[in-house]
Image (cartoon, rainbow, N blue to C red):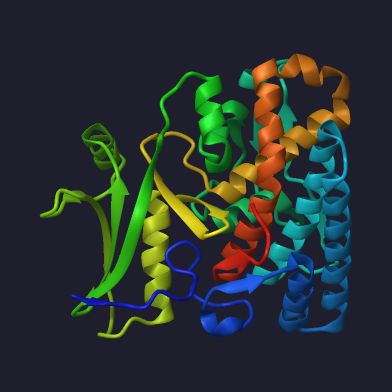
Amino acid sequence: MVEVEEKYGFPLFARQSSVVNLGKNEKLVISDIWSFWDYVIKKASSDRKKEEFLRSLLEQAKHFYQSAEGSPVKSQPLLYYYSFLNLSKIMINIRGTFGPSRMYMHGMKEDHKHKFINSEIVKQRQKQQIVQVAHELVSLFDPGITTSDLTLNTKNILNHCVGVHRAYSEIYSQSEIFVRIRKYHLYKHGKALIFKAMLQCSSAQSTDLIARGYSISIDEDGNTIYTESINMNSYQPKRADYANLSAQIKNKGIWYFIGNSGYTMYLSTCPDNRYSQESIIYMMMFYLGSITRYHPYMFDKIFSDKEQWLMSEFLGTQPKQFLYLATANVLGQSVLKAYASF
């Protein structure tokens, strides 16, 4: 086997095609996400009308996000959600052909049921004449998601949010579900493209991962190894091969967050609600934004004291995760932030 260079956002973000050609398909290190998106819009827009539409959305997204950062915790969710909503309209237009003349709707609704653990979010069905932003966005991150209505329990989907998972597990007295990928390599052997990852894993977790469909083995040094591979049409991997292997890995399930040293990745032993980070953060921000908009007087009743701490952790850490992870995912390139902490 011969080790292969990792590029095109592999293994997390590789796509069949790029939105714009940036950084020779390598990692992008940026200091200002908003200026970066302004540049992407200019590069990707095919006409002046579309560019003006997308830039107006970007201006609103930036304003709402920066306002949220300086607001009290209970005021933040609605501002962050409106930021994400406008940024999401840009993302689905970058990857699709909706345009400024279409009608855009949230495409979600919530039912708080007077208690967070019972609350539900409904991702509403795809429509033809109306752009359901939630469906179109989540479909970018979770391509297999149903086009019909999908009802989800808020507590359950938050289980797969890596950034708050330890707090979540502590509050709800459950075992952690994530298995960390310690390191990984990409190889080719003949026309096979092979991903091998070393896991920080117990034997019980290995059994659970096998039950989830992962290919798990033990190497000669006793390390737990996760393997995925595809067959290529030629002996040299093309962009499509990176994208196909990435899609196969993501279809099995891989979770991640961005930190000061790059991306940390995990597999999950939990069989339920295996949605992507980006989708979870977006849907949860809609839910929290709806509470603060329509039921602010019920905030303390819907969330227990411990859950209020969990929501504070979520709001303090996940907005920036969404900005950078969603950007990387849509563009199909790894994106890192320069000179700042996460």
- The answer to which image quadrant residue 57 occupies is bottom right
Left or right: 301 as drawn, with respect to 159? right
Residue at image x 71%, y 41%?
316
Q: Pick the residue in front: 340 or 189.
A: 340
Residue at image x 87%, y 28%?
294
- The answer to which image quadrant residue 227 occupies is bottom left
Q: Residue furthest left?
A: 220
Image location of residue 342, percent across then percent down:
64, 52
Q: How many marks?
A: 0
Q: Pick the residue in front: 71 or 15.
A: 71
> Is residue 47 placed above or below 35 in the rendered structure?
below
Q: Is residue 177 visible?
A: yes
Image location of residue 169, percent across then percent down:
50, 26
> Is residue 229 placed above or below 317 in the rendered structure?
below
- The answer to which image quadrant residue 63 occupies is bottom right
Q: Pick the residue in front: 24 or 113.
A: 24
Quarter placement of the N terminus: bottom left
Image location of residue 198, percent across then percent down:
28, 54
Residue at image x 70%, y 56%?
128
Left or right: 273 as drawn, with respect to 327? left
Image location of residue 264, percent across then percent down:
47, 53
Q: Is residue 192 visible?
A: no
> Is residue 154 placed above or below 6 in the rendered structure?
above
